[in-house]
Image: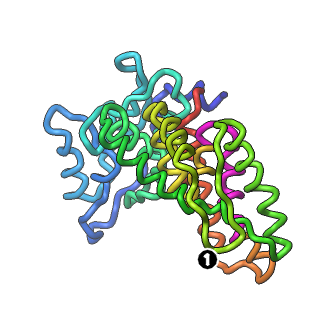
Amino acid sequence: MQALRRSLVPLTRSHLRPPANCHRKWVYRTQATVASSGPAATATNRAEATLKRFWKTVGIEERDDAFAVTLDKRPLRTPAGKPLLLPKNKRLVATLIASEWENQETLLKPHTLPMTSLTSRAIDAFSDDEQTRGEVRAQLLKYFETDTICFLQNKPAALVKLQDTHWKPILQWARSTFGVEISTSDSFILSPHPPETVHVLNDVMSKFDHWQMAAMERTTYTSKSFLIALALVMRQITAEQAALASHVEVNSQIELWGEVEDSHDVDYHDVRRQLGSAACLLSSL
């Protein structure tokens, strides 16, 4: 709470003066742009040309009855040029976005801007574009056709235990909550889910707001499971529980063969960063 109370005070720490011989290309364009009196891309072009951190202060301001994250008093914009504005019940999201930009160093690192990219995705793709929403729903339902947690193996014992702990509760929740049948298999072939089930779950997503749709998309792609994502978006499980569910097969292998350094540990943190950003986007703090 103390961090949130400080969130409306501009963050003034400034660093970085990059070496003159650094490569000029900068991927800032893919994350967000900064509003200026000229075109939205002006600040981006400046960053690409100089490779310098051109902003000295990061802040959060109230604008149009919403929160705007600012760089040197200029509000961030999405890649599509829309103002990156957060409603008053998304103060935590604004604080996290501001923190991401404050902690950038010599080179902008896209993987360190999960909240910025996810929020931009919500605004650009899902706020008023019904065609995109429909296309994304169709893509996410393809994950449901071969959902990871529908493949329940009967050995080894370590895998069975993890499935019972992390997968079966989600399956039971989805069946009872939405009144649908969900196919499972103990082999490599999964029978198609009933068309009625697919229709019901598509209808559930059609009622999501743009924040929920962005969180659903990221969580599905990260966990490789439609049902894990749905449980997270519906707040049935936490980000950590979603991460554990998405790592059931990997963790069972680790129990048998041990951890592969610089592989399992990197994936561990990346999954939690992505799922954590989705969970935070859903917050109403």
Magenta span: chief secondary structure: helix
Estimate the x, y position of residue 122 in percent, counting from the top left: 40, 39
**On the rendered image, what quadrant is the C terminus found in?**
top right
Task: Choose between 213 and 198: the one closer to the eye.
Answer: 198
- Which residue position is annotated with label 1? 262
Element class at badge 1:
loop
* The quadrant where residue 116 appears: top left
- Pick the front one: 229 or 48: 229
Q: x%, y% of residue 33?
A: 28, 43
Q: Is residue 246 one of those drawn in magenta?
A: yes
Residue 36 lies within the magenta run? no
Write down the region rendered in magenta: 232-250
Residue 202, compared with residue 110, is above or below; it is above
Q: In the rendering, at what x and y percent does residue 98 appear?
A: 46, 39
Residue drawn at x 32%, y 39% is 124
Q: Position of residue 49 (x, y in %)?
A: 19, 58
> Which quadrant of the structure image shows residue 127?
top left
Q: Is residue 7 visible?
A: yes
Query: How is this picture coloured?
Result: rainbow
Taking depth in this image into account, of 126 and 261 the one nearest to the observer is: 126
Residue 208 higher or lower than 158, as above or below: above
What amino acid is found at the position of numbered circle 1 in the picture?
Answer: Asp
Category of crowding for the residue at label 1, using alpha-carbon neighbours closer than 10 angstroms: few (below 14), some (14–19), many (at least 20): few
Q: Residue at x 45, y 50 (%)?
A: 113
- Closer to us: 256 or 227: 227
